[in-house]
Amino acid sequence: MFGQISIPWNDRRLAAGGAALLVLALVVNGCAEPAPAPDLAERVPGSDRPRLLVLGTVQDGGLPHAGCACSHCERARNDRDDARLIASLAILLPNPREVHLIDATPDLRRQLDRARPHRPSSAAGLDRSPVDGVFLTHAHWGHYTGLGFFGFEAIHARGLPVHCSPTMAEFLALNGPWSQLVEFGNIQLLPFEIGRSIALGQGVSVGPIQVPHRDEYADTVGFVIEGPGRRVLYVPDTDSWPAWTPPLTEMIAGIDVAILDGTFYSADELPGRDVSSIGHPLITDTMDLLERLVRERGLSVYFTHLNHSNPALFAETPARREIESRGFEVLSESQQIPL
Ligand SMILES: [Zn+2]
Ligand SMILES: [Zn+2]
Ligand SMILES: [Zn+2]
């Protein structure tokens, strides 16, 4: 299932233009080394450069988590500044202005509002094309069900490009209510091939990689988003790193910024549960694995997809201080990362 990755991203840089179903045209890019990255993250908008906008940073249940009265969820419920949206990114292109989503979450309405200043609509009323495309990682609740907002009962979009794996495309095309989006022409499914990038223009491409994860309905992917100056790996949801072939440390060669699954902080977070059964890498394990690359190569690592139980959710906590003292960061809502 996982093992057909043939791209060390610093060696082969393939870009594919894809408009037709199941047909992706390949174009081999030049192999210039990416420019050094003096500024690791910008939290203020820059308008002249492709960049990522963080639309959400927590696990599928949200924060406050649906139906939960734990101390973290009560804190987020009482102070909306502490609330977070479900993990998602937007790729912002400056000229012409385009917005491409990575994942379509149940928080999509608010996430479209967050991206809207970067792609103002000329229409006075309902904008039926609020984004230019969507890339999906997998068929779990928090990652694709926001597609429903593009359907007949809401935006009623016209031919929105949805890039996903062939098994994900098959799942959406054959199962309601998603199949109705296809039948009504609200979305256009564009299956990609693992390891072959999709060129968005303006020097930006998106390359899918296979990710080991619970695959009940479809397989799971992560993305390498490559811009003119930086290569970002986005893996919000994965099994723990020993399941990766090739190993993460090999995959991450040539990556400047890694935004990784930080669902759980440590084994202490889930008393009474066998760590090996958690099905996600622990933040503490990821730091052990990557700390040398962070310190010696300047790799920038952010954690996302935090569970509501995660002690690193909030600033000024011991867990957050430990993360930052080791050179890592927790991804912030609305943060921007230049590409
Ligand atoms: Zn998830
Ligand atoms: Zn909770
Ligand atoms: Zn998942």
Image (cartoon, rainbow, N blue to C red):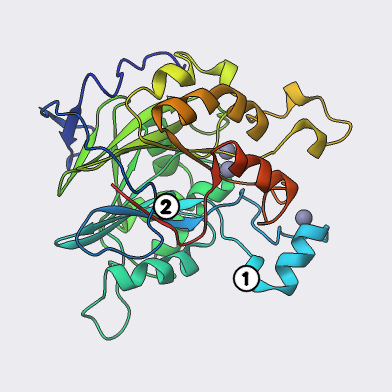
Q: Which mark is residue 68?
A: none
Instruction: State how many labels appear.
Output: 2
> Disc 2 vs disc 1: Cβ atoms closer than 8 Å?
no
Q: Residue at x 27, y 66 (%)?
A: 129
Mark 1: secondary structure? helix
What residue occupies the far right of the structure in this picture?
Answer: 272
Mark 2 lies within 8 Å of ligand 1 (Cβ measured): no
Rendered location of residue 271, percent (x, y): 87, 35
Q: CA distance from mark 2 to mark 1?
A: 19 Å
Is residue 314 or residue 191 the one in the foreground? Answer: 314
The location of residue 67, given as percent across then percent down, is: 77, 60
Farthest bottom residue in view: 124
User: What residue sits right under mark 2 in the picture?
Assistant: 89
Q: Is residue 332 left or right of residue 136?
A: right
Q: Is residue 68 visible?
A: no
Return the residue nearer the eye: 72 or 124.
Answer: 72
User: Residue 36 at x, y = what percent?
Assistant: 26, 37
Q: Which residue is mark 1?
A: 81
Q: Kindly identify the residue that appears in the image at 54 percent across and 38 percent down.
A: 327
Left or right: 208 with respect to 178?
left
- Mark 1 packing: few (<14 Cα in 10 Å), some, or many (20+)? few
Point out residue 183 in the picture as x, y percentages from the top left corner: 33, 53
Give ligand 3's quarter of the image: top right
Q: Hey, which quadrant is residue 66 in on the image? A: bottom right
